[in-house]
Image (tube, rainbow, N blue to C red):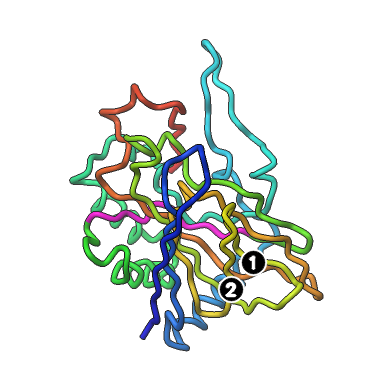
């Protein structure tokens, strides 16, 4: 059975009014399920090319011209995105009553590996999602591949186009699962602007309000140069998602993907 702890700390971030909220989890999965996830993640890491379009898939409109944001320092990294349903052409047409069924149908459409599906369904049974799992949507799963000397620079998760209210009021979580053991002086630590540090271990996870709390990952300085194994899912409360009826508030245009 997973060991779960919760911590809430005040933040000095003056851009967004919030506290830093974090759940940590130990011994999340039985050995068989953990090994299956590790094999799957290694398969993604072993691919020759990495699909990174959805790191920077936003399109902005400058007068009558569409401009695609194709690159930035934050997006200059390898990443695999098994899915991001917020890019689906029918995402904006949903509403709080339909979005859960919509994403679950996509989850079981054959596009997502069964081990990832089992992972998501298990996470729905844990806090902070377990009190009202029908209200939480897992809209994205990605793998950040921090090869040697690469760091994940400090950032916020998600995008304002996803939300129908100010960021300080949005209910969202970023849940990262780890499949490697941290070693001192080899980097890979999760950290926040306010000084919180998490050193990963196999079969552990961290869940935080990453859309509000500035955070990053220190440079990978592993002796053998191997990348860090793990993946992140992002979750939104159905009542805080920006759908078509709020499209006049969007700062980005949707570019249909699926």
Residue 188 higher or lower than 224, as above or below: above
Would you identify the image quadrant in which residue 127 lies?
Answer: bottom left
Would you identify the image quadrant in which residue 162 lies?
Answer: top left
The quadrant the N terminus occupies is bottom left
Would you identify the image quadrant in which residue 161 lies?
Answer: top left
Q: Is residue 19 magenta?
A: no
Residue 93 higher or lower than 4, as above or below: above
The residue at the far bottom in this view is 31
Q: Is residue 138 magenta?
A: yes
How far is mark 2 from mark 1, CA to CA?
7 Å
The residue carrying pointer 1 sits among few (fewer than 14), some (14 to 19) or many (20 or more) residues within 10 Å by Cα, namely some
Give how far across and how far down residue 41 sits, in percent: 57, 70
Q: Main secondary structure of the magenta part?
A: strand
Q: Residue at x 43, y 31 (%)?
A: 254
The residue at the far top in this view is 63
Q: Which is nearer the eye, 191 or 99?
A: 191
Residue tagged 2: 200
Q: Is residue 115 left or right of residue 72?
A: left
Give how far across and how far down residue 99 sits, in percent: 26, 47
Q: Is residue 96 left or right of residue 178?
A: left
Residue 196 higher or lower than 98, as above or below: below
Q: Which is nearer the eye, 190 or 52?
A: 190
Q: Is residue 177 left or right of residue 224?
A: left
The residue carrying pointer 2 sits among few (fewer than 14), some (14 to 19) or many (20 or more) residues within 10 Å by Cα, namely many
Residue tagged 1: 189
Task: Report the magenta residues as a range.
Answer: 135-144
Give how far across and how far down residue 3 sits, in percent: 40, 81
- The answer to whether mark 2 and mark 1 are in CB contact below 8 A is yes
Give how far across and how far down residue 227 sits, in percent: 70, 68
Q: Judging from the image, what secondary structure is the residue with disc 1 in?
A: loop
Q: Earlier in the sequence, mark 2 or mark 1?
A: 1
Q: Judging from the image, what secondary structure is the residue with disc 2 in?
A: loop
């Amino acid at each position: 059975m997973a060991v779960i702890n919760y911590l809430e700390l005040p933040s000095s971030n003056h851009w967004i009014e919030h506290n830093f909220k974090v759940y940590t989890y130990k011994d999340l999965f039985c050995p068989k399920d953990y090994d299956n996830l590790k094999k799957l993640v290694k398969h993604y890491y072993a691919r020759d090319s990495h699909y990174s379009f959805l790191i920077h898939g936003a399109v902005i409109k400058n007068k009558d011209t569409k401009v695609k944001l194709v690159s930035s320092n934050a997006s200059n990294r390898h990443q695999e995105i098994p899915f991001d349903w917020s890019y689906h052409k029918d995402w904006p047409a949903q509403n709080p009553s339909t979005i859960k069924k919509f994403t679950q149908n996509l989850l079981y459409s054959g596009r997502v590996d069964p081990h990832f599906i089992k992972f998501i369904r298990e996470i729905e049974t844990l806090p902070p999602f377990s009190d009202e799992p029908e209200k939480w949507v897992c809209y994205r799963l990605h793998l950040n591949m921090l090869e040697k000397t690469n760091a994940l620079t400090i950032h916020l998760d998600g995008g304002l186009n996803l939300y129908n209210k100010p960021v300080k009021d949005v209910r969202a979580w970023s849940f990262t699962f780890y499949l490697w053991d941290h070693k001192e002086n080899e980097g890979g630590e999760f950290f926040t602007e306010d000084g919180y540090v998490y050193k990963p271990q196999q079969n552990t996870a961290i869940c935080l309000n990453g859309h509000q709390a500035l955070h990053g990952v220190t440079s990978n300085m592993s002796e053998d140069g191997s990348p860090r194994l793990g993946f992140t899912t992002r979750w939104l409360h159905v009542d805080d998602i920006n759908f078509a009826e709020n499209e006049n508030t969007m700062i980005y245009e949707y570019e249909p993907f699926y």
